[in-house]
Amino acid sequence: MKFKNFRTLTIPAVYIMSRLQYTQKFFLLSILFSIPIILGLYSFISEINIEINKTRTEKLGLHTIEPIQHLLQHVQQHRGMVIAYLGGESELEKPLLEKRQEIEQDFIDIERANQEFVSASGPENPRFKETSANLQNLKNEWDQISEKIDSGTLATSLESYRLHTALAQNILVAIAYIGDDSGLILDPYLGTYYLIDPIIRSIPLISEQLGEARGLGSMISKGRELSPDEKQTFNSILTTVNTNVGSLNRGMEIAFIENASVQENLSGGLKDVVLQTSGFLNFINKEIVDTKVFGVQSDEYYQIATKAIDGTFEFYADTSSELLLLFDQRIKELEAKRNIITLAVGLIMLFVAYLFLGFYLGLQKVIVALRQTTEEMVSGGGGASISLDTKDELGEVASLFNRLAQALTRSNMELKETLAKQLKTEEALEVRAVELEKFNRLMVGRELKMVELKKEIAELKEKLPPTS
């Protein structure tokens, strides 16, 4: 019953296929088999291309963050220099002017990088407008600070510190925005994610917290008594920096586990950052938090702080370079994977087409052989058969045809023999008929002679005289 149901289900397929030539059958089957393969390949390649584009967007985001990081570093340096200049170090006037020129160049580089990022990623994204507005606000804040410096209205170090710190905080926000817009913060690979986090969060935060400590300490003169509020402020900075350094360490440990080359290239820089930062924090703890009177010169304090801050930016540069290498490596691997899969599928499809062609040509060979053998049989050739070097169903068809041909040949020979026998019989009958006819003629002649003899005897009897 089940077999009958299956046969019923196959009736439409049999009906369609039985009305198509083999070229049409092969073409139809090839199309039907190719559709899911092409769709699957398209979906797979699309996913790889999406991943490649995401990685390239992350690279663009990283390139955009780079000049913003430079801006952060230069603003921090400008903050410390202005504090020292307002504190009486007039020899810093020329370095301050040079630093301002560096910052102006930073804004030019930021604008150029942002335009490239927006153009490559798609300007229709509304977040890009918000990010561009944030970057423009940074420029406006900087222009206000520059104007106050030029006009001489930036009178106190504390006011300068607050303005610069507000600008630095907004720079950190801008970095976070770029990290969101470029997808850096959503990177799915642990080995790169924990390198991205220091670039968009840990290192900028640590450098700014250290910069704030540098600025605040530079405003304290040697021998001045420290207030509880000042100690509390520095103690809060110590706690926050320690927390962020611990987060940086944990993240980098994961990155090191995921990629041995990252550990080889960055472990030394990370160790230096931790040592320099810890050294500066211990210095703050000893000279400010745990003492009543500030016991060091401002320039000495500034140099110690600057060494620690510069170390964080050096580590940022090394981490950024390493991350770019990993992005490039990821893109190459994805492209290689895409190319290998495309090539493999292409070769498989070509091989399948090659097999289809071989099957079709083999079928054509059988058809030609059947046609030729049939024509030989029709024309009277005996002993015709098909010889195929195949073990599939076509070979079985040829074998059956050969059996049929042999049977027909035997039947034909038997028929010829029968006909020959019949011909011989007919010839013998004809001979006997001729002989019989001759015999009949002879017998008829004898009968006629006997009649004549009888008539002659009767006439002689009549002529003889009667006896007495």
Image (cartoon, rainbow, N blue to C red):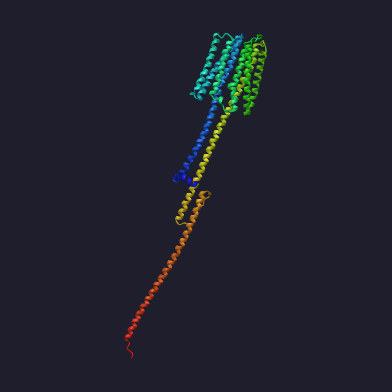
Is residue 31 found left or right of 284 in the rendered image?
left
Image quarter (top left, top right, bottom left or bottom right) of the C terminus:
bottom left
Is residue 199 found left or right of 14 in the rendered image?
right
Count of numbered badges drawn on the protein? 0
The answer to whether residue 5 is visible is yes
* Residue 305, quarter of picture: top right
* Residue 283, quarter of picture: top right
The location of residue 91, given as percent across then percent down, is 61, 10
**Direction bottom: furthest residue:** 468
The location of residue 248, given as percent across then percent down, is 62, 22
The answer to whether residue 383 is visible is no
Name the residue nearer the viewer: 21 or 453.
21
Tell me if residue 44 comes above or below residue 87 in the rendering.
Answer: below
Q: Residue at x 66, y 18 (%)?
A: 278
The location of residue 127, given as percent across then percent down, is 51, 22
The location of residue 356, given as percent across then percent down, is 50, 43
Is residue 293 found left or right of 52 in the rendered image?
right
Name the residue nearer the viewer: 75 or 249.
249
Tell me if residue 18 comes above or below residue 103 in the rendering.
Answer: below
Q: Residue at x 49, y 49 (%)?
A: 366
Tell me if residue 376 comes above or below residue 284 in the rendering.
Answer: below
